[in-house]
Image (tube, rainbow, N blue to C red):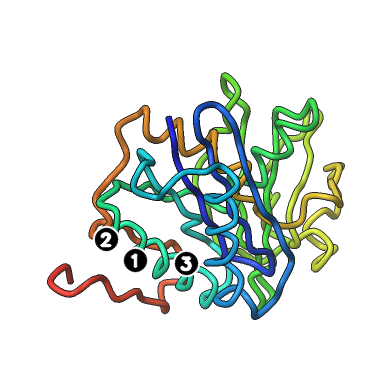
Amino acid sequence: MNLLVIDAATEACSVALQVNGKTYSRFEICPQQHSQRILPMIDEVLKEAEVKLQALDYLAFGRGPGSFTGVRIATGILQGLALGSGLKVVGISTLAAMAQEAATNTESSRIFAAIDARMSEVYFAEYRLVEGVVSLVAEEKVIPPELALANTQLDEKAVGVGTGWAAYETINQSHEVEVLADILYPNALYMLPLAVSQINAGNAVDVEDIEPVYLRDKVTWKKLPGRE
């Protein structure tokens, strides 16, 4: 399966390409420069793999949660790529991407992902590793940090990823979650297996049907003309 994944939902900007079993990727921490960097990064991996966008099978993107502006940038660019190529797309959770990185590079099978959502809140979710791919437990939510782990039983080793842990120490009070300081942001490279899983499950859609995920209801997204 040949596919391209892009993400710009946080301070990091990343692109990953899977072609004929090989992967090519770019990852940069570049606050407020996503709109300038993401298209060149896409060009770089396509050229490195010597493949045209139209030769791919699918597209995927980090659909949030994260920065409102960043999620909009990724969504808008994906719309342009998909409309130009006719490829179907899948949206990948930024929280799941960080959990997948932890599961891939450590022996962790229970992962809590938390992104600093500002306004004294975090975007938060729990994941379990199931047959090589992380699976969401319950639901993603935006929540005060001190409530994130409320009523959570930690009778086994668990790790935490994302910027939320350092931003709010109260998230981990009275708990023993091991925070992985080297996994702060989602990386499109680790969205690849999640995208493949989604595609194999039949969840790829036409670009007109994609929606970013903000978690805060006060934020809305304008779909393509005729799709409101």
**Residue at image point 79% right, 25% down:** 107
Task: Say whether disc 2 or disc 3 marks the residue closer to the N-terminus.
Answer: 2
Q: Is residue 123 left or right of residue 159?
A: left
Relative to residue 8, is residue 104 drawn left or right?
A: right
Location of the C terminus (image quadrant) = bottom left
In the picture, the disc for residue 214 is 3
Q: Amino acid at mark 2?
A: Leu
Measured as percent of width and height from the top left, residue 140 is found at 52, 52
Q: Earlier in the sequence, mark 1 or mark 3?
A: 1
Q: Residue furthest left?
A: 226
Q: Position of residue 218 (x, y in %)?
A: 41, 79
Which image quarter holds the N terminus?
top left
Mark 2 or mark 3, whichever is nearer to me:
2
Q: CA distance from mark 1 to mark 3?
A: 21 Å
**The quarter of the displayed image where residue 208 is located:** bottom left
- Which numbered disc covers residue 80? 1
The amino acid type found where label 3 is placed reads Tyr
C-alpha gap between disc 2 and disc 3: 23 Å
Q: Residue at x 70, y 76 (%)?
A: 31
